[in-house]
Image (cartoon, rainbow, N blue to C red):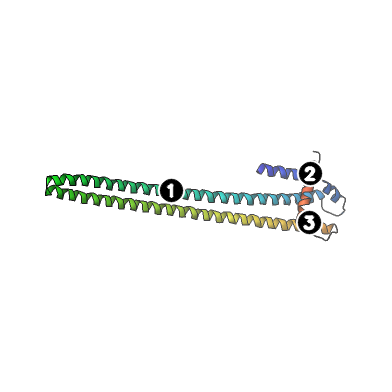
Amino acid sequence: MADSRKGRVKGLFGGPSPDNELMAEAPGLPDPQTQHQALQVLVLAQRTADEHVASARHQADKIRADARGAAEQIAREAQAHAEGARREAGKTLSDARAAAEQIARDARAHAEGARRDAEKFLSDARARAEELAKSAQAKADGLQREAQQRYEDVVGSLAAKRAALQQQIEALQQFDRDYRARLRTFMHSQLQALGVDEPPSNADIQQSGFVAAAGAAAAPE
């Protein structure tokens, strides 16, 4: 893009144009080539400012999309881990219940002492299952909080970057307004020097730039 702008600047300064020939015939005016070059540089500055504004907006949209995708991926991973931990706890509890039931059947065949052992085993198994369930839930809650924190960090970073980009956009817009005002003042002063009192409109300024650029491109080297 920089090479393209350099080429346009080189094209703006190369060769005479019909406007230069007309302004050269007016006595007492500044160098028409200098006036033409100044006009074309201001037009090019306007185009460059528009390009920077579009690029900054595109970058802000891309950062916002990347942050949203990262946050969603973190949330999905946390949810999958929590579900796996819950399934593991459920399986442990199911296995413990099956083992306890088997021991209970054996205990009924081997008397009261074996039954007490089975009840103790079942109690221990239930306590273990509850401990695993609590641990899994705590881990899931921790992952959820971590995911939320990372999401907030990403969103906060995005907000800061967005604010910086917004400042750049506002600076470029101010640059655009300043250059438009300077270009309008310059054109108005030149028209007054030529005896024309009506100030040029934005369309006249752009048309003047296009005609001068076309004349410069058509001129032989």
- Identified at 24% across, 45% down, the residue is 98
Residue that label 2 marks: 216
- Identified at 85% across, 47% down, the residue is 21
Residue that label 3 marks: 187
Which part of the image, by quadrant, shows the N terminus?
A: top right
Q: Position of residue 58 (x, y in %)?
A: 59, 49
Check the image and report above or below for 77 versus 202.
above
Name the secondary structure under disc 1. Answer: helix
Name the secondary structure under disc 2. Answer: helix
- Identified at 40% across, 47% down, the residue is 80
Outermost bottom residue: 197
Q: Position of residue 37 (x, y in %)?
A: 76, 49
Going from N to C along the chain, the mark reached first, 1 or 2, is: 1
Q: Amino acid at mark 2?
A: Ala
Residue that label 1 marks: 76
**Quick check: 166 left or right of 77?**
right
Q: Amino acid at mark 3?
A: Met
**Quick check: 65 left or right of 97?**
right
Which part of the image, by quadrant, shows the C terminus?
A: top right
